[in-house]
Amino acid sequence: MSIEHDNRVIVVGVDGSTGSLRAMRWAIGEASLRGCAIEAVTVWHAGSYGAATGQAAEDLRAQVVKEACSDVSDGPPISEEIETGVPEEVLVARSQRASLLVIGSHGVGSIRHAALGSTSEYCSRMAACPVVVLPTPADGDRHTEIAEC
């Protein structure tokens, strides 16, 4: 079975964390180099983000996209998507047609997930396209932002 990738789409997992901001900024730079679009995907389920609806997830996604694009004057086209489900499963499904999947690491987790978080580990193993995981900054400060993509 052959999988057709859309070389014009980079999927980015966006959950409102600083890791997803790093991922979004990196993806903007990469999409500009490749001449492709970005799908900023936020996945939620009842109880996530402390909300019974997807509004909180939508707000977080919009905030990350706005902040990531604040220094970009002429960036790639970005579509903002929200989907209900399990984040890693939704991102892997989206990878079926993407040229690249980009996610940020939260830098937390059990010993089992010492190198990668559970979502990034799952996506790295199961995605149908290459996966880029933006790590937590080496100094351990999860609030440090990258200056340039």
Image: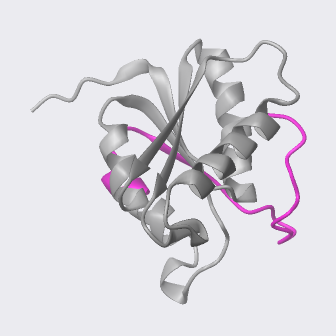
Q: Please give the name of the residue rendered at 63% of the width and 61% of the height, measured from the top-left corner.
A: 105
Asked whether residue 124 is drawn in magenta, I would say yes
Query: Compared to 8, does 67 lie above or below?
Result: below
Taking depth in this image into account, of 104 and 80 the one nearest to the observer is 80
Kindly give the residue lying farthest to the left in the view shown. Answer: 1
Say whether residue 109 is left or right of residue 71.
left
Q: Please give the name of the residue rendered at 71% of the width and 27% of the height, measured from the top-left corner.
A: 29
Query: Compared to 140, does 19 lie above or below?
Result: above
Does residue 105 appear anywhere in the picture?
Answer: yes
Q: Main secondary structure of the magenta part?
A: loop
Instruction: Give, as a single range, the part of the protein colored magenta.
Output: 123-149
Say whether residue 93 is left or right of residue 19.
left
Q: Please give the name of the residue rendered at 37% of the width and 20% of the height, measured from the top-left corner.
A: 6
**Label tally:** 0
Query: Compared to 134, does 51 lie above or below?
Result: below
Q: Say how the picture is coloured.
A: one colour
Taking depth in this image into account, of 115 and 84 the one nearest to the observer is 84
Q: Quadrant of the C terminus?
A: top right
**Which percent across, then down, holds residue 4?**
25, 23
Q: Please give the name of the residue rendered at 72% of the width and 44% of the height, measured from the top-left corner.
A: 64
Asked whether residue 41 is drawn in magenta, I would say no
Does residue 116 appear anywhere in the picture?
Answer: no
**Which percent across, then down, holds residue 79?**
54, 26
Q: Quadrant of the N terminus?
A: top left
**Which percent across, then down, holds residue 138?**
81, 65
